[in-house]
Image (tube, rainbow, N blue to C red):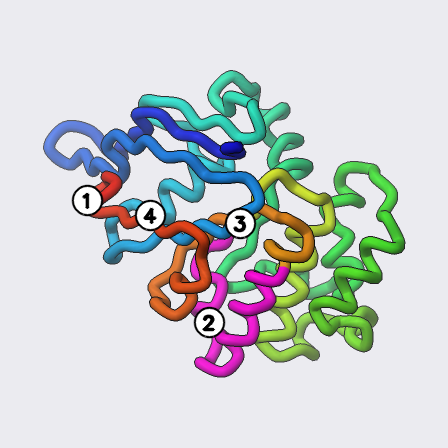
């Protein structure tokens, strides 16, 4: 079963001779409960594709469906709620709120939605990601790897339809990158989570169930 699909997806920036075709007709299907890696050279359209899947960009042309919902049919306020509930994001630079504790950062999506946390699930997440002793710390008190683990927990806490990870190990050293990579893979296996990940790291891409390569805004090969 496919949880994310794109059809003839295009995203252009600028106009006239300066127009940039970041994506130029991408048809793609993401299988539910699998880890999909998106690879390609810088400027190939990877991040643009991820942002369109997450509803952060509106397409110039074409459609994006996530969990059966056509994102192009949603108003901005509806799209904001959909992202908060059905899409988890993991960024290269963690994007944790520095004034909040790790516990508060993880629970933030639920707080913004006015939802109560599932205590058992929260404890399971914290245990799996090795954060039990760090929950009352602030982000600056953790290593880069620790902060990224917290970001992964935050992405998972709403049990989203899909997690979108943009170079999730890009700011980490090789040893920590490997650890975080295996944790990402574990979230797929343990929670049957769908994960779409951009990466330049070939070792990380090898962990994926599927690999999609982009070149000049199109799916290559």
The Cα–Cα distance between marks 4 and 2, rounded to whole angstroms, is 22 Å
Q: Residue at x 58, y 59 (%)?
A: 95
| Quadrant of the image occupied by residue 179 | bottom right
Q: Is residue 104 left or right of residue 175?
A: right
Sequence order check, earlier mark of 4 and 2:
2
Between 76 and 22, which is closer to the camera in this rendering? 22
Residue at the image position 26 percent from the left and 30 percent from the top: 25
Nearest to N terminus: mark 3 or mark 1: 3
At 39% from the left and 64% from the top, the residue drawn is 206
Residue at numbered disc 1: 216
Q: Nearer the viewer, residue 122 or 190?
A: 190
Q: Which residue is mark 4?
A: 212
Q: Is residue 168 magenta?
A: yes
Q: Nearer the viewer, residue 43 or 184?
A: 184
Q: Is residue 119 magenta?
A: no
- How packed mark 4 is, by other alpha carbons closer than 10 Å (few <14, some 14-19, many 20 or more), is some
Image coordinates for residue 167, horizontal then vertical, percent: 43, 60
Look at the numbered disc 2 and give the secondary structure of its residue.
loop
Q: Which residues are magenta?
A: 165-186
Task: Specify the label residue 171 is tagged with.
Answer: 2
Task: Name the residue beneath numbered marker 3.
Answer: 195
Which residue is rendered at x = 84% and y = 61% of the image? 123
């Amino acid at each position: 079963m496919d949880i994310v699909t794109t059809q003839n997806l295009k995203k252009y920036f600028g106009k006239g001779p300066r127009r940039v075709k970041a994506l130029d007709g991408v048809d793609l299907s993401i299988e539910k409960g699998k880890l999909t890696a998106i690879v390609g050279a810088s400027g190939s359209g990877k991040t643009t594709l991820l942002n369109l899947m997450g509803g952060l960009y509106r397409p110039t042309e074409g459609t994006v469906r996530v969990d059966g919902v056509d994102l192009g049919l949603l108003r901005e306020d509806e799209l904001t709620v959909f992202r908060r509930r059905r899409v988890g994001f993991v960024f290269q630079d963690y994007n944790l709120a520095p004034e909040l504790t790790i516990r508060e950062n993880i629970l933030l999506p639920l707080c913004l939605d006015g939802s109560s946390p599932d205590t058992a699930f929260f404890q399971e997440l914290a245990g799996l990601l090795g954060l039990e002793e760090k929950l009352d710390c602030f982000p600056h008190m953790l290593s880069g790897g620790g902060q990224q683990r917290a970001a992964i927990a935050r992405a998972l806490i709403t049990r989203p339809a899909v997690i979108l990870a943009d170079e999730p190990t890009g700011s980490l050293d090789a040893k920590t990158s490997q650890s975080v990579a295996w944790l990402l893979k574990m979230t797929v296996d343990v929670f049957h989570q769908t994960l779409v990940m951009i990466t330049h790291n070939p070792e990380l891409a090898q962990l994926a169930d599927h690999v999609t390569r982009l070149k000049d805004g199109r799916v290559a090969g």
